[in-house]
Amino acid sequence: MKQISSRDNALFKHLKKLAASARERRKSQQTLLDGTHLIAAYLDQGYLPEMLVVAAAALDNAEVRVLAGRVADNKLVVLDDGLFGEISTVESATGIAAVIAIPDQPARADAAYCVLLEAVQDPGNLGSILRSAAAAGCDMAYLSPDCADAWSPKVLRAGMGAHFLLALQEHQDLVSVAQKFPGKVLATSLQAEKILFQCNLSGKVAIVIGNEGAGVSAELLAAASEVVRIPMPGGMESLNAGAAAAICLFERVRQLANTPAGGRLDKT
């Protein structure tokens, strides 16, 4: 077990950069998981962190001690409480973080349910959409180059473990992805005549979610096989991107649950 109490320590400086810098995360191919729930989700998927970082005071916390006991002692680093506060991105920090290697997640040729995210720039929205996609049974998420960094601590926290259930492909040409997808590509637009609930979402499906303000680009709308709108009888002009994504993603779940198969959620 290693203990760090100095801000001049090289490892502490690296941890601060991982918390704050997408460039550092890309360079090192590492990121930080912050909090007990996220670390537990990571371990439960069979992954092992490169390092577990614990605030000194958190060693008295039973949940933290259980997580620390799941990694080898030589991978445990204890930080002074003040130093841990400088690397944590959580207001009410649980006192534990993990350094992990960003996993290599190759595209799946057999993917039957995907989400295509175009310029989703708010980390909370992006993480929330990934969480909904994982919960709805998606295989893959494709992200355009101007999305928020999928592996930032804020997106990871909002995703609540979704990153370890989906294959993520960042910096993708979504028009090309849509054109090559061997199934239905569904995009939303406020101007569409057809509503989402009139659309058959059986078979292979890719759901397109656009930018929080601008929506889906004209180029990607043209590449979609169907463009629909979410009805809003209450009079609001638009929905939050995360809410719109959840409605679209779980409409497919609802439709498959009502098939003659008796609720069997096949992805074929």
Image (cartoon, rainbow, N blue to C red):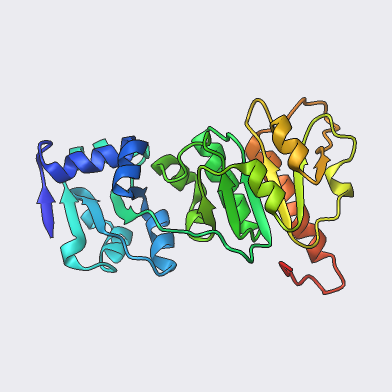
Residue drawn at the location 78% of the way across and 33% of the way down: 189
Q: Position of residue 199 (x, y in %)?
A: 86, 50
**Can residue 80 be seen in the rendering of this structure?**
no
Task: Pick the quarter of the image with the C terminus.
Answer: bottom right
Q: Is residue 166 left or right of residue 13?
A: right
Residue drawn at the location 45% of the way across and 46% of the way down: 157
Q: Position of residue 24 (x, y in %)?
A: 30, 40
Q: Quadrant of residue 232?
A: top right
Residue drawn at the location 70% of the way across and 40% of the way down: 244
Task: Pick the quarter of the image with the N terminus.
Answer: bottom left
Residue drawn at the location 89% of the way across and 40% of the way down: 194
Q: Of residues 46 and 211, which is closer to you in this image? A: 211
Q: Of residues 204 and 122, which is closer to you in this image? A: 204
Q: Position of residue 57 (x, y in %)?
A: 20, 49
Q: Of residues 127 and 64, which is closer to you in this image? A: 127
Can you say whether 60 is above or below 190 in the image?
A: below
